[in-house]
Structure formats: C-alpha cells, structure tokens
Image (cartoon, helix red, strand yellow):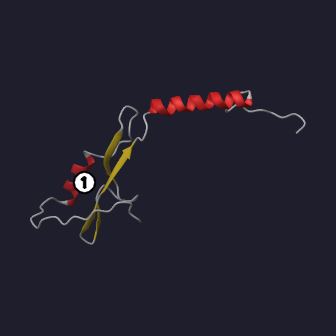
C-alpha cells in the first residue's frame, strides 16, 4: 500500500482508550460522499478493504481520513457542458450522443 499523505503521531503514555472504543468514536464521523450542495466532505474510512475503521498490526493502530473536495460547483460544470454541446451540435448538424447510421459505408 502506498500513501499519498502519511502523518505519524506518537500518543502519550497514559493513552487509555481501547481499540473497540476508538473504532466506535471514529464510526460517528465515518466518511459520506460529498453531496451536491457542499463543496467538501471528510470522514474516516477503513485503511484496508478487509479491516474496520482501525487496523491493528503488532500493537500499531492505523486509521485513515478521506477528504473529497469539489473543484467546481455543479452549476459551472453544467453550464460549460451545455455550451460545448451546442458547439458540437452546430458543427456536426446533430446533438452529441445521437447515433448516426451510415448507409453504404
């Protein structure tokens, strides 16, 4: 597994929270995909496909935070798409996505 951004923290010695308790706390902030009305979303995800929100390996705990950001609002993307579709329709003579059957080709 390769990391895009890895940050390692050493927790203080009197760390008393258990693995199950930490996983329960992280589950309250689990990742939800970015809805159309929000510019960003973040939350906890399993660090491995076959693991929970906390992966324990030889006494080391691995957790993963996922961040999803929208670079452009949906209205800007839709406006640009409609402008391009109109340009293509005027150049080709028919709207994009339409299937054209060629006779004798």
Considering the image in quadrants, where does the C terminus appear?
top right
Residue 12 shows in this picture: yes
In-image side of 75 versus 22 (left or right): right
Which residue is at the far left? 14
Q: Please name the residue that numbered disc 1 is placed on.
A: 23
Between 46 and 67, which is closer to the camera in this rendering? 67
Rendered location of residue 31, percent (x, y): 33, 46
Q: Quadrant of residue 22?
A: bottom left
Callout 1: few (<14), some (14-19), or many (20+) C-alpha neighbours within 10 Å? some
In-image side of 86 versus 78 (left or right): right
Rendered location of residue 21, percent (x, y): 19, 54
The residue tagged with tag 1: helix, strand or loop? Answer: helix
Considering the image in quadrants, where does the N terminus appear?
bottom left
Residue 95 shows in this picture: no
Rendered location of residue 81, percent (x, y): 56, 32
Between 8 and 24, which is closer to the camera in this rendering? 8
In-image side of 26 versus 92 (left or right): left
Which residue is at the far bottom? 58
Between 17 and 65, which is closer to the camera in this rendering? 65
Q: Quadrant of residue 101?
A: top right
Q: In the rendered view, would you say 28 is above or below 98? A: below
Residue at position x 27%, y 72% in the image: 58
Residue at position x 25%, y 45% in the image: 28
Which residue is at the far right? 104
In-image side of 98 versus 13 (left or right): right
């Amino acid at each position: 597994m390769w990391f895009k951004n890895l940050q390692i923290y050493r927790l203080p010695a009197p760390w008393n929270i258990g693995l199950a308790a930490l996983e329960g706390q992280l589950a309250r902030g689990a990742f939800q995909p970015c809805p159309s009305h929000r510019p960003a979303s973040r939350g906890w995800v399993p660090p491995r496909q076959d693991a929970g929100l906390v992966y324990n390996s030889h006494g080391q705990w691995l957790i993963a935070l996922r961040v999803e950001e929208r670079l452009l609002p949906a209205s800007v993307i839709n406006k640009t798409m409609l402008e391009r579709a109109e340009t293509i329709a005027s150049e080709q003579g028919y709207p994009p996505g339409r299937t054209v059957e060629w006779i004798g080709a």
